Amino acid sequence: MREDSWGRGYGTAAVRQVIAYAFTATHLDRLSAKHHPDNPAFGRVLAKAGFTHATVFQGQMDGELVAYPVYEIHRTWAGPYRPISR
Ligand SMILES: CC(C)(COP(=O)(O)OP(=O)(O)OC[C@H]1O[C@@H](n2cnc3c(N)ncnc32)[C@H](O)[C@@H]1OP(=O)(O)O)[C@@H](O)C(=O)NCCC(=O)NCCS
C-alpha cells in the first residue's frame, strides 16, 4: 500500500473482508497471519480485525534471524463473522 494511504483504515477493512470471505465462502476454521517485527502497524491491523496473538515464528530474512509475531482467528459457530470495534 502506498504510504499516502496509510492510517485511513484501508488495511483493516481489507483484512476484515478476507476474514468474512474465509468464514462464509470456504470451510476454513482458522486463519493465521504473521508480520515482520519492524511492522507493528500490521499487528495493530490484525488485532483490530479480531486476530489474537498466538505465538512467535522464528524465521529468516536476508540471512538474518527474525522473530515474527503470529496471530490467529478462529471461526465461531455462533453466527457470521462480526468484526469487533476497538
Ligand atoms: C501495515 C499497513 C498494511 C496497514 O494498513 P493501513 O491502511 O495503514 O491500516 P489501518 O489504517 O487500518 O490501521 C493502522 C493501525 O496501525 C496503527 N499504527 C500505525 N503505526 C504504528 C506503529 N508504529 N505501531 C503500532 N501501531 C501503529 C495505527 O494507529 C492504526 O491503528 P488505530 O486505528 O488503532 O489508530 C500499511 O500501513 C502498510 O502498507 N505499511 C507499509 C508496508 C508494509 O509494511 N506492508 C506489510 C508488509 S508485512
Image: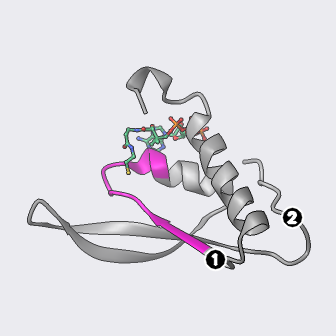
Residue 36 sits inside the magenta stretch: yes
* Residue shown at the point (91%, 75%) measured from the top left: 78
Q: Is residue 13 above or below residue 59?
A: above
* Residue shown at the point (56%, 40%) measured from the top left: 11
- Kindly state the secondary structure of the residue where label 1 is placed: strand
* Rendered image quadrant of residue 35: bottom left
The magenta stretch is: 31-42
* Rendered image quadrant of residue 66: bottom left
* Rendered image quadrant of residue 50: bottom right
Q: Is residue 83 above or below residue 27?
A: above
- What residue is shown with label 2? 80
Q: Quadrant of the N terminus?
A: top left
* Residue shown at the point (59%, 28%) measured from the top left: 8
Q: Residues within 10 Å of mark 2 (few under 14, many from 20)?
A: few
- What residue is shown with label 1? 30
Disc count in the image? Answer: 2
Q: Position of residue 77 (x, y in %)?
A: 86, 78
Residue type at numbered disc 2: Pro
